[in-house]
Amino acid sequence: MEKTIFEISKMDCPSEENLIRMKLDSIAAIKNLDFDISNRKLTIFHIGQIDQIETSIAELNLGGKKISTEISKQTKFEENTNQKKLLWKVLLINFAFFIIEMTTGLISKSMGLVADSLDMLADSFVYGISLFAVGGTLIRKKRIAKIAGYFQITLAIIGFTEVIRRFLGPDKVPEFSTMISVSILALIANGFCLYILQQSKNKEEAHMKASMIFTSNDVIINLGVIIAAILVNGLNSNKPDLIIGTIVFILVIQGAIRILKLSK
């Protein structure tokens, strides 16, 4: 048995963890995956095939780099029996906020909220693939990943089109109060999702969980929408909202591309 440690520089939240798990699922040599998201480290226990493991991690473009490989005598690993329950919780929370942010974004004319809702939907896709493909064949998992990836890209392109239309059209200022209040609720929801997921990692202390929450891309996006709302109110312009919407749409497409890579 070998133990290889990887640094995954772009592993910011459990969504990336699930992408990695799905990517490595077909490698029979892997016996256990141990994620340390707060420190962006992944420890893999395996029997050979390190080249295939390195290639698979590199294909995700998450900044994966092998740090060390050593012989390990460990043969027994703890199984997390409540992982599926935790995944269901965060899936439902993310999907609920997708609906909330999409609805309020359209009503308040905020592309920032609409874009953030798609980011929530993207996370729901990742958790959903992990849940619904459990026990299924690799072909089934790849098929689900392909559908989710293309659907996500389609929504993001529609969003980009609307952003361009609003840039060129009349300056309709979004509702500041709706933007700020919904974004704060989404920020709390993301923090809670990351917290409850970490209940499966007994080795992590509370301060480690907190540090992970505040380095998450999802939380950074929420803060970006909040800042955009403040600028919208201060400048009486929709441009800050359109700019943050554009940035988030780009991130959504990048996430969709990662999901599509799982289908190859």
Image (cartoon, grey):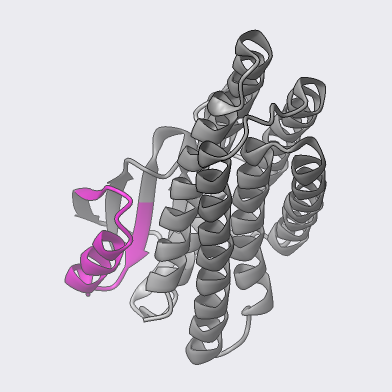
Q: Residue furthest top?
A: 234
Give the side of residue 189 with respect to residue 13, left or right.
Answer: right
Residue drawn at x 36%, y 62% as measured from the top left: 45
Query: Where residue 153 sits in the image (x, y, percent)?
Result: 50, 64
Identify which residue, 160 or 5, lies in the foreground: 160
Q: Quick one: 65 or 144, which is closer to the camera?
A: 144
Q: Which residues, given as a range, are shown in magenta?
A: 43-66
Q: Tally the numbered discs.
A: 0
**In the image shown, does 126 or 248 lie closer to the viewer?**
248
Image-based side of 32 in relation to 211, left or right: left
> Quarter holding the N terminus?
bottom left
Q: Position of residue 38 (x, y in %)?
A: 47, 34
Residue 208 in view in this figure: no
> Is 212 rendered above or below residue 159?
above
Locate residue 39, reporting x and y percent: 41, 34
Image quarter of the C terminus? bottom left
Q: Is residue 246 above or below residue 88?
A: above
Point 64% across, 19% down: residue: 232
Picture coordinates of residue 6 (x, y %)?
29, 49
Q: Is residue 234 visible in the rendered structure shown here?
A: yes
Residue 212 falls inside the magenta stretch: no
Toward which corner of the image does residue 60 lie, by quadrant?
bottom left
Q: Is 50 covered by the magenta stretch?
A: yes
